[in-house]
Image (cartoon, coloured by chain):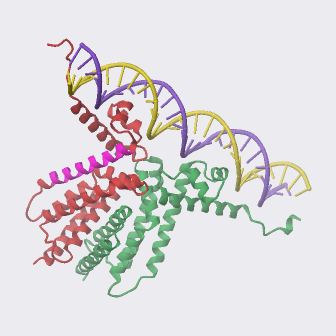
Chain colours: A green, B red, C purple, D yellow
Amino acid sequence: MSSTAPARVPQEERTRVMRARLLEATVECLVERGFAGTSTTLVSQRAGVSRGAQLHHFPTKDALVVAAVEHLSEVRCRELVAAAAALPTGERRTRAVLGMLADHFTSPVFTAALELWVAARTDPGLLGAVAPLEQRVGRETHRLTVELLGADELAPGVRELVQATLDLVRGLGLADTITDDARRRSRILDEWAGVLDAALKERAP
Amino acid sequence: MSSTAPARVPQEERTRVMRARLLEATVECLVERGFAGTSTTLVSQRAGVSRGAQLHHFPTKDALVVAAVEHLSEVRCRELVAAAAALPTGERRTRAVLGMLADHFTSPVFTAALELWVAARTDPGLLGAVAPLEQRVGRETHRLTVELLGADELAPGVRELVQATLDLVRGLGLADTITDDARRRSRILDEWAGVLDAALKERAP
DNA sequence: AAACTTCCCAACAGTCTTGACTGTTTGTTC
DNA sequence: GAACAAACAGTCAAGACTGTTGGGAAGTTT
């Protein structure tokens, strides 16, 4: 009766689920234990996956981590686009855009990405995987920010101001990892929004 | 003269030299191999110190790293003050201050500090040592920046602008660790110098 | 000079991590 | 429905790292 069993779980689906569970667990471990604390045994335990199954899907730790990097960059892009869709328009638009960016750069996915950046600095294999993907995410974020702010990138200085804004929120995100101070962050963004708005307006009359 | 007097080195001096060598080697390892790659054996090899001697001065790895954190914070403060003394005055002062800060936040000492920050996030013992010292360095840096810019911190928004500037260079420093782009950094600082100068002038008439 | 402290050295035990290995179950194909 | 391939499970060995132990050398004090 082989022809009357169409609803069994196909291989492809099982593989997909298994890999997704492992990658999700990897990101969680990165956030909770850091890169050095993310051992393969810990990941498999957390994912509820046997060690053998893990080694089957990801033969080495590098393979697992590189796949996690790709997974994470996709998640980051998705989250950004989703958050951008819920932004208000009008007077406080700029401040809202900054708030969205700051939220992203203080979220767990950013923390995980930070662990990977720092680890990649001294790990050539990891750097090869992280660098191009990070560049892609960075470009996408820049493009999105320009669009959300309605800035004219052809005007001189505008491109640099947007980059400065992104580097600022990156710095805020870094500071947040060891000393969480949301009030301080909020005041800084208030001030930055005013300055940025004025500068952009002045550069695109 | 006595029969055996090849080189009488007092204890105090020996320990001082030994500890300094070990701390210096620790920072170097942090920069080259990252925190996870900084093993105690590697440090002792690099310092040209036997493992036994290392264990004598720093019984545990934590003790070594904590001492390195303190050492590093002192070095950072010294470097900042020294660089500040060589700044020009006049028209391009603000840009020069930003350049000095950016240089500091892309230097090896910053790289080492970054490794410690990230590691401290998931290591309570290390966090206890890093957090207060980082706060001290941060405050000192802020104070110095306000002074160098000649800003009036009592004026509303000025404090936030200085903090934003420091977070910006921190973000630039983070970006620099994986993709070194000095030209991009320079253009951003050019633009921000103009905006910051205008904003500060406007807020302190 | 002798007792005493500090400093230094080398070998070792215990723990953790990675990836290799053997065996079992499940799905696919002929 | 039988052969085959993929997915899954659990154990094992090699290597690395940390911190301990016991002994010996150099410096200090009385």
Q: Most extreme residue toward the bottom, as rendered?
A: A90
- In this view of the protein, which residue sits in the foreground, C3 or B127? C3
Q: Quadrant of residue B170?
A: bottom left
| Residue B44 horizontal side relative to residue B196, left or right | right
Q: Is residue A160 above or below residue A19?
A: below
Q: In this view of the protein, can residue A131 be seen by the observer?
A: no
Q: Quadrant of residue A43?
A: bottom right
Q: Is residue A193 above or below residue B144?
A: below
Residue B51, percent from left and from top: 39, 32
Residue A3, percent from left and from top: 86, 67
Prevailing SS of the magenta stretch? helix
- For the point 61% across and 48% down, which residue is it? A59
- For the point 27% across and 75% down, which residue is it? A192
Q: Is residue B195 above or below residue B49?
A: below
Magenta stretch bounds: B62-83
Q: Is residue A49 above or below residue B158?
A: above
- In this view of the protein, which residue sits in the foreground, B153 or A120? B153
Q: Most extreme residue toward the left, as rendered?
A: B90
Quadrant (top left/top right/bottom left/bottom right) for the N terminus of chain B? top left
- In this view of the protein, which residue sits in the foreground, B141 or B63? B63
